[in-house]
Amino acid sequence: MEHSVYETVGGSEALTRLAAAWHHRCLEDEVVGHAFSGPGLHPQHVERLAAYWGEALGGPAGYTAGMGDHSHVLRLHAGNGEHADMDWRGLQCFALALDDADVPGDPELRRTLMDWFAWMTAAMAAYPRSPDDVPDDAPLPVWSWNGPPDPP
């Protein structure tokens, strides 16, 4: 049986390290830093982010079981206009955070994680006009070694 991306990356512990490393990189970045500071950020942002990422990569339903749903996450990112520069910088921070968090260097795993993160970044930018545009029942897409899930 093939291991999920979640299992191969190292599970919850590894994704918590990765979320912390990415958050740190983003805070230090002059383009994306403002989005990761201020009073609107949840006090357990890193842990919640790791749970969300874990579920999206084939792990347990730690995020949707009690923290929120995919529509909530999309709304958090919606209504901010177009921000391709910020998205690109966030992706660069993610690439660097892979090393910071000691994610295994397997090329297939790294490529899969980068493809997933780029895809999810685009999904987060899909509602630039308003959070009201986000549907109420958006399912959390689970990424596999074969890429994005089939559309619903």
Image: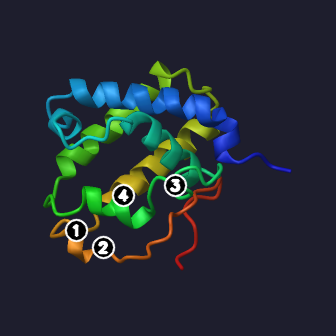
Residue at (24% x, 28% y) in the render: 27
Q: Are marks 3 and 1 in contact (CB under 8 Å)?
A: no
Residue at (76% x, 45% y) in the render: 3
Q: Which label was assigned to residue 73?
A: 4
Mark 4 residue type: Val
Query: Which callout, 1 or 4, points at the residue further toward the start of the chain?
Result: 4
Query: Quadrant of residue 102 in the image?
Result: top right
Mark 1 lies on residue: 131
Instruction: Check disc 4: other Cα within 10 Å, few if <14, some if 14-19, many if 20+.
Output: some
The answer for how far apart the CA atoms under marks 2 and 1 are is: 6 Å
Query: Does 101 sit above or below residue 145?
Result: above
Q: Are marks 2 and 4 in contact (CB under 8 Å)?
A: no
Q: Secondary structure at mark 1?
A: helix
Residues 12 and 62: in front is: 62
Q: Are marks 2 and 1 in contact (CB under 8 Å)?
A: yes
Mark 1 residue type: Pro
Mark 2 residue type: Val
Query: Which callout, 2 or 3, points at the residue further toward the start of the chain?
Result: 3
Q: Secondary structure at mark 2?
A: loop
Q: Secondary structure at mark 3?
A: loop
Q: In the visual, does 6 lie left or right of 97?
A: right
Camera sees residue 123: no
Residues 128 and 131: in front is: 131
Residue 98 lies, in percent from the top left, at 48, 28
Q: In the visual, does 115 lie left or right of 6?
A: left
Residue 57 lies, in percent from the top left, at 59, 50
Instruction: Check disc 3: other Cα within 10 Å, few if <14, some if 14-19, many if 20+.
Output: few
Mark 3 lies on residue: 66
The answer for how far apart the CA atoms under marks 3 and 1 are is: 21 Å
Instruction: Check disc 1: other Cα within 10 Å, few if <14, some if 14-19, many if 20+.
Output: some
